[in-house]
Amino acid sequence: MQTHHLKRRQFINRLLFVLVCFFAALTSVPLLAILGEVLFRGYSQFSWDFITESTPTAFKAMQAIAAGETIPGGIANGIVGTLLMLAMATVVAVPVGVLCGVYLAENRKSKFANFVSYLTDLLQGTPSVIIGIITYIWVVVPMKTYSAIAGSVALFIMMLPLIIRSTEETVKILPASLKEAGLALGGTYSKVVLKIQLPTAFGGIFTGILLAVSRVIGETAPLMFTALGCSMLRWDVDKPIAAVPLLIWEFFNDPNLQQLIWGASLFLLIFVLMLNITAKKIAKKWKS
């Protein structure tokens, strides 16, 4: 009787293991199909000129297609705009998000902390297009122009809840003895937080920051309402500026430029992949 029961359990375990492996493989099929399609179509376009030259006009693209040549130009204006807006958003979002996360972790029972935590969850679930519209009303309308500033504000709003949550969860798992030891040695609360807790939690916090950047780098909807786009390489933060997701949308709407979609998509995939690999390596380093 016991032998029969044991064999039945072993059969069920094997069956569940096979089912888990099957559904895991099934889940990876769409991802691998997307990656394969982007790599296959984007690899031929990916070159140094594609990264360093600005977007070509539709007329130049049409001439190249008619002559059977590769479309000239690239996405340099989008890369510069994306990096510029990400840098501006990150500079503001990191200190605000980290300090807010520390406050939530240190004041878990406070009513105000619970209210801020609820707002953070609400903001994290807000659709990006709504954030774009709100930023348009708050920034674009008063400035009377689309700009990199408006785009960075939209990205800042989207990055903030991710940084807050990662900081809060990282600080929560720090041993209480760490803060008690710092206070016992005569350190003020601010010094204990800034010089002991935050450096100790740096790995998790930095990982959260990189994940927040990789989360917003591919957003298109909020930038359509704020940055608008530009075909030239531009560094002015108070004027309309391009971004890689915006270029992909523009390429899609122009039949003469649709071939450039795959190279721009491949660039985004590589950039996000590098950020995620960096985040995992840093997290692994600080855990060990």
Image: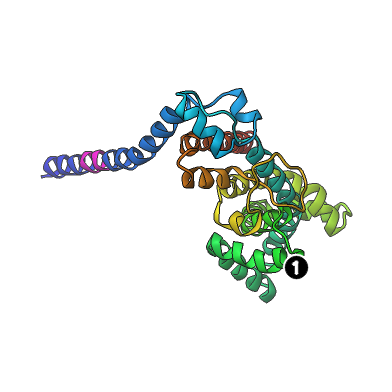
In percent of the image, x 35 and y 36: which residue is there?
A: 33
Q: Assign a secondary structure to mark 1.
A: helix
> What residue span does the magenta drawing correspond to?
14-19
Image coords of residue 208 (percent x, y) = 62, 48
Q: Which of 145 and 285 is in front in this view?
A: 145
Q: Where is residue 91 in the image (x, y as percent from the top left)?
A: 76, 49
Q: How crowded is mark 1: few (under 14 residues within 10 Å), some or many (20 or more)?
A: few
Indicate the amino acid at tag 1: Pro
Whole-percent x, y for residue 275 in the image: 60, 37
**Relative to 49, residue 200 above or below:** below
Kindly tell me whether residue 214 is visible in this rendering: yes
Q: In this view, does 221 lie to the left or right of 26?
A: right
Magenta span: chief secondary structure = helix
- Write down the residue under mark 1: 142
User: Magenta includes 95?
Assistant: no
* Quadrant showing the N terminus: top left
Q: Which residue lies furthest to the bottom in this view?
A: 111
| Camera-nearest residue between 239 and 191 | 239
Q: Which is more toward the observer, 159 or 82?
A: 82
- Locate residue 82: give its quadrant: top right
Residue 267 visible somewhere in the drawing: no
Residue 6 at x, y percent in the picture = 18, 41
Q: Which residue is drawn at 62% across and 52% down?
A: 166
Q: Is residue 126 left or right of residue 66?
A: right
Q: In which quarter of the image is the C terminus?
A: top right
Q: Please indicate whether residue 13 sits to the left or right of residue 180 in the image.
A: left
